[in-house]
Image: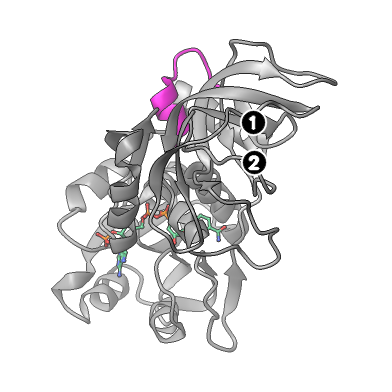
């Protein structure tokens, strides 16, 4: 089958032929119709996460997928052949595949759920990692209606979902972006959008103008150095909370969560129901053929994501 793989860590991803996988007991095989790009995909290609079992090369990249159940392994079963499903490949063990492939095998008890009838597979594929991250960040901040959240990196996958989920709960979202993205972010529900490229003091002036004592929460999807994170954390009121998805430490005395995604099938089901009900928009910005995944990964690494990129397989 066709797949996008690396031959070693930090090698260029390329289109390869690999054997079609067979489902192990307790797994389903999914004929993938769409996979979605996440920064985790190129981060994984750069090296194994701490503590992870090293993969077998060629290592097929990709985390998020949507398609149809095509074969079912032995044992207890909750799916039927032909079911439309979407989900997330979590840490494929050695020799197993990621989602940038024609077929993927995943355990039935992993984050995989049925796609509601009215939701297209290309939309469902864009939901798993970024959607569940946004939902779990929101629960971890425990910010209530009427309070405020400063969101750094709001134009990407996680940011577009988080802006919508927070706004729907009555939380004021200050979206920090690069470029002229005010209209797009307002449509997603942001209270204010600040282009951080217009000057070093623009963001502080905007936040203090709206919330003189500072925002109630910071979610930083971007900063990888402590000084940058601390500068944003200085815009949080005393007693407020900060969250990073990039593993960067907070200054002493600041309430801080080093976010780690723990996706579940139940949460996927909730998000898909919200999409089907018209309460959550899935911002698919680009749809490309699988062959274009290597270039798209290079582009994502350089920045500039606007919502999600999906690959038609
Ligand atoms: N810890 C976890 O469990 C977990 C879970 C999910 C995601 N993550 C991480 O969280 C990060 C965000 O994920 P994602 O899926 O949203 O990525 P994404 O779709 O690539 O979006 C990142 C966004 O950040 C923007 N950006 C970059 N630098 C910026 C800056 N200085 N100021 C404002 N905006 C900036 C980018 O646009 P511009 O370049 O145009 O500014 C882009 O829109 C990734 O690094 C991902 O690996 C971690």
Q: Position of residue 48 (x, y in %)?
A: 59, 62
Q: Position of residue 205 (x, y in %)?
A: 24, 77
Q: Is residue 273 above or below residue 79?
A: below
Picture layout, residue 1 above or below residue 51? above
Q: Which quarter of the rendered picture does the C terminus lie within?
A: top left
Which class describes the residues within 10 Å of circle 1: few (<14), some (14-19), or many (20+)?
many
Q: Nearer the viewer, residue 182 or 155?
A: 155
**In the image, residue 208 above or below residue 195:** below
- Does residue 179 appear to the left or right of 33 in the view shown? left
* Disc number for residue 96: 2
Q: In the image, what residue occupies the spot 40% across and 51% down?
A: 13
Q: Is residue 308 left or right of residue 64?
A: left
Identify which residue, 221 or 125, lies in the foreground: 125
| Segment tinted magenta in the rendering | 115-126
Return the x and y of residue 304 as percentages of the image width and height: 25, 56
Q: Residue tagged by mark 1?
A: 105
* Mark 2 crowd level (few <14, some 14–19, many ≥20, 10 Å Cα): some
Residue occupying image coordinates x 31% and y 75%: 208
The residue at the point 43 percent across, 50 percent down is 158
Mark 2 vs mark 1: in front: 2
Corner quadrant of residue 76:
top right
Give the spatial CA distance, label 2 vs label 1. 8 Å
In this view, the residue farthest toward the right is 75
Residue drawn at (36%, 70%) of the image: 211
Q: Measured along the vertical axis of the image, is residue 130 above or below residue 2?
A: below
Which residue is most to the bottom?
Answer: 252
Tell which circle, 2 or 1, labels the residue nearer the N-terminal end: 2
Label 2: which secondary element:
loop
Q: Which sits in the foreground, 193 or 259?
A: 259
Residue 277 shows up from this direction: no
Q: Are marks 2 and 1 in contact (CB under 8 Å)?
A: yes
């Amino acid at each position: 089958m066709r797949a996008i793989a690396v031959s070693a860590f930090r090698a260029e991803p390329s289109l390869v032929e690999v054997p079609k996988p067979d489902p192990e007991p307790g797994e389903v095989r999914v004929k993938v119709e769409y996979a979605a790009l996440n920064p985790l995909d190129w981060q994984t290609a750069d090296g194994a996460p701490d503590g992870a079992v090293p993969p077998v090369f060629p290592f097929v990249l990709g985390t998020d997928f949507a398609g149809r159940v095509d074969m079912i392994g032995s044992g207890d079963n909750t799916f039927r052949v032909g079911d439309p499903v979407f989900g997330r490949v979590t840490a494929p063990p050695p020799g197993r595949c990621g989602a940038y492939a024609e077929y993927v095998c995943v355990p039935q008890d992993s984050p995989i759920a049925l796609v509601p009838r009215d939701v297209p597979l290309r939309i469902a594929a864009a939901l798993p990692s970024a959607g569940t991250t946004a939902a779990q960040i929101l629960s971890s901040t425990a910010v209530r209606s009427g309070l405020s959240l400063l969101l750094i990196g709001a134009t990407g996958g996680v940011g577009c979902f988080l802006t919508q989920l927070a706004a729907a709960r009555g939380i004021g979202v200050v979206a920090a972006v690069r470029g002229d993205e005010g209209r797009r972010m307002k449509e997603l529900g942001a209270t204010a959008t600040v282009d951080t490229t217009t000057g070093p003091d623009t963001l502080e002036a905007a936040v203090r103008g709206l919330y003189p004592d500072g925002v109630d929460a910071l979610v930083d999807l971007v900063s990888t150095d402590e000084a940058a994170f601390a500068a944003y954390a200085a815009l949080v009121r005393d007693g407020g909370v900060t969250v990073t998805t990039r593993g960067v430490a907070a200054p002493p005395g600041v309430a801080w969560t080093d976010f780690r995604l723990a996706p579940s099938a139940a949460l996927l089901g909730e998000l898909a129901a919200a999409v089907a009900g018209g309460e959550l928009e899935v911002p698919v910005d680009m749809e490309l053929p699988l062959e274009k995944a290597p270039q798209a990964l290079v582009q994502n690494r350089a920045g500039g994501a606007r919502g999600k990129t999906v690959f038609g397989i």
